[in-house]
Image (cartoon, helix red, strand yellow):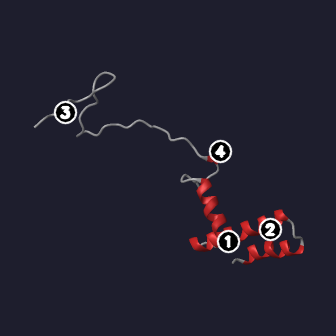
Amino acid sequence: MDVRAGVVVGMTLLWIRPWTLVLAAAAVGVAWWLERLGLNPPGAVRAMRSYLAGKNRPALPFHKIREPVDFGRRRMAWERPAPEGDHHIEPIKHK
């Protein structure tokens, strides 16, 4: 049992009420479950914060992230010329 759950159990012994008994049982249950997962309470809080933050965590604040700029790509001399019209789709060549 983690010491943090023991604090709740100690407080329950000082003021025995049904809701404090339920709170102590829940604290012991959560501490046992975290121990089975191999986490301590601060590690579990960090894991939960990482889960809630999501996969995309930019290094800059939202208001400082600049939009990408398209400067227009120029074709090199050895590349084919740009296709004519709005859309250019080449047919699939079957063997």
Which residue is at a point 63% across and 46% down the rendered structure image? 62
Cα–Cα span, label 2 and label 1: 15 Å
Mark in front: 4 vs 3: 3
Residue bearing the label numbered 4: 63
Q: Are marks 2 and 4 in contact (CB under 8 Å)?
A: no
Identify residue type, mark 4.
Answer: His
What percent of the width, then of the height, locates residue 61?
A: 64, 50
Distance in Å between CA atoms under marks 1 and 3? 61 Å
Q: Is residue 51 above or below residue 7?
A: above
| Mark 1 surroundings within 10 Å by alpha-carbon count, few (fewer than 14), some (14 through 19), many (20 or more) | many
Crowding near the residue tagged with mark 2, few <14, some 14–19, many ≥20 C-alpha atoms within 10 Å = some
Quadrant containing the N terminus is bottom right
Of marks 4 and 1, the one in the foreground = 1
On the image, numbered disc 1 is attached to which residue?
Answer: 31
Instruction: Tell me which residue sits at (68%, 69%) in the image.
Output: 29
Residue 72 against residue 28 in the figure, above or below: above
The residue at which mark 2 appears reads as 21
Q: Residue furthest left?
A: 95
Mark 4–mark 1 Cα distance, whole angstroms, equals: 39 Å
